[in-house]
Amino acid sequence: MMDFDYIVVGAGSAGCVLANRLTADGRHKVLLLEAGPTDWNPMIHIPVGYSQTLKDPKVNWLYNTEEDPGSNGRVHVWPRGKVLGGSSSINGLLYVRGQMADYDGWAQLGATGWGSSDVLPWFRKSEGNERLKDELHGGDGPLNVSDPTTHHPVSDAVIEAGVEAGLPFNDDCNGEVQDGISYFQMTVKNGRRWSAAMAYLKPAMQRQNLKVETEAQVSQILFEGRRAVGVTYVQDGRQVTVRAHREVILCGGAVNSPQMLELAGIGDPEVLKAAGIPVRHALPGVGANLQDHYVVSVQFRLKPGTISVNELSRGWRLMVEAAKYAVNRTGLLTLSAAHIQAYWRSRPGLAGPDVQYHILPATVDIPRFVEKQLWELERAPGLTIAPCQLRPESRGTIHVKSHNPFEAPAIRPNYLSDPIDQQTITEGLKFACTLASQEALKPYVVDRLTPPPGPMNDADWLGYAREMGSTIYHPVGTCRMGQASDPGAVVDPAGRVHGVAGLRVIDASVMPRLVSGNTNAPTIMIAEKMAAAVLADAREALSA
């Protein structure tokens, strides 16, 4: 049995941060375990490679949900990173913090110390923004944040159309106000994806007090009484047991962290009994409170002769784009999953935007998407405007199906189960059409492609949303933060699992509510803040 001070399970966005911060002073011996491989795959490091990694089982868990009633009984594919860097190595590279009011909401829900003024220093600590460095943004943090090197005339016109439709131009949607429209900033450095592995893990891997094991899937958390003392993992067909003198820290994300807790007998007693798992500690919030952003695309046909991303992605034009990338790291291959971000309020009286748009001058093959949920670009020029509700009210669950650690859990997202969600996505879809009808886009847009042209009422739009919507890869909340007196809380505001010792969860699963935007930057912020809490507890223990 090998001994460490800390065992970190999962080398995703949070795990990479912890591996770096916990080993920085040389005092603590840390083992980082990752079920997937190293990030050698070149498709990880070329930004547009997400188009391949999002469907590659070598670096992706590719979970299937259960049949979802709110989306016409469809099964959804959930990509999650299974590689060094986790989902930050396969995602769409978009840097979005959400609204500061999101974090004040967390504090009101019992996550003491997580208000907007509490989290801002940790966002700044993590951020290395190439353009913005002020009281709101960090300029020298590990996570590089950059503007796109390449604009597109249709995307430029979309921004102009947004202003015509009443959206302010906002060149910093991560600033004090989120409302508006602009190009996304991206986690890209010198034309390469800047994942958490690149930003945090690689600089730390030369340290003697950090050991990283890949293709090592944890099968069991070990306990002595009510204290976690180590884990067992499987690697190359053999079982390995390791001990943690201080803590075991789960960084498996919204899917894997509740799964590992339930396998350890920590969770809802009824769920555990049904799976044949003895109850170690009753904690009914484990696997509950699941939230995700449900995105629905409206597609528009562009006029013949317009060169959209569809055309740039094939034939001789793709060869030209590859040459641009090889020579100066610009062009198509540096693009993120969307060019334009827009934030809009679906009804009067809201304190902030409740709809986010991901916009790209490209369209996918819809029959192929409906059949297999594969994003494959069309040949004809097109534009996609895709709204998602920022703060959904619908709640789902993630629970183990059995005591087998290698069986995927049951994911039940319950999309569009709340009337507010139904109303918001309907209004968001209608505004997408309003945006596309503005004067600035008339030189480009021919007509709506999907749904087909023609009048639609609210019921039609909701039916379209149920049939065509999908995850935008932002599951959170299944091990949420809160006080010990809160029966739904799983961890305290420092990530410590209620009711047991020596065990934390640090990842997106601890979010009490989904943030108003993409989740990678907030997850890295959470890991920065909680890593400091882990080290503070260690210092306190040494001085006691």
Image: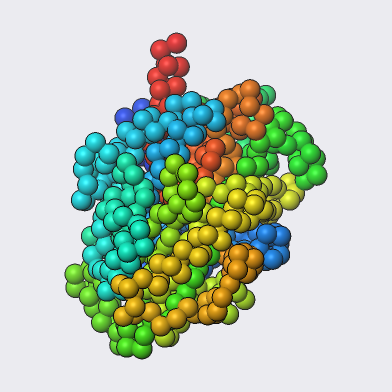
Residue at the outermost top position: 544
Residue 434 falls in image quadrant? bottom left
Question: Is residue 444 among what the camera can see?
Answer: yes
Nearest the eye: 169 or 262: 169
Question: Is residue 227 among what the camera can see?
Answer: no
Residue 61 falls in image quadrant? bottom right
Q: Is residue 471 left or right of residue 16?
A: right
x and y percentages locating residue 215 in the rendered image:
52, 54
Instruction: Say above or below: 353 vs 328.
Output: above
- Say which residue appears at 24% left-offset and 36% top-offset: 135
x and y percentages locating residue 369 in the rendered image:
56, 74
Residue 94 falls in image quadrant? bottom left
Q: Is residue 381 left or right of residue 355?
A: left
- Say which residue appears at 27% left-offset and 78% top-offset: 321
Of the 4 image quadrants, the one containing the C terminus is: top left
- Say which residue appears at 56% left-offset and 61% top-offset: 426
Q: Is residue 401 left or right of residue 303?
A: right
Instruction: Say above or below: 454 vs 281.
Output: below
Of the 4 image quadrants, the one containing the N terminus is: top right
Nearest the eye: 5 or 479: 479
Instruction: Say above or below: 539 vs 10.
Output: above
Instruction: Say above or below: 60 vs 396.
Output: below
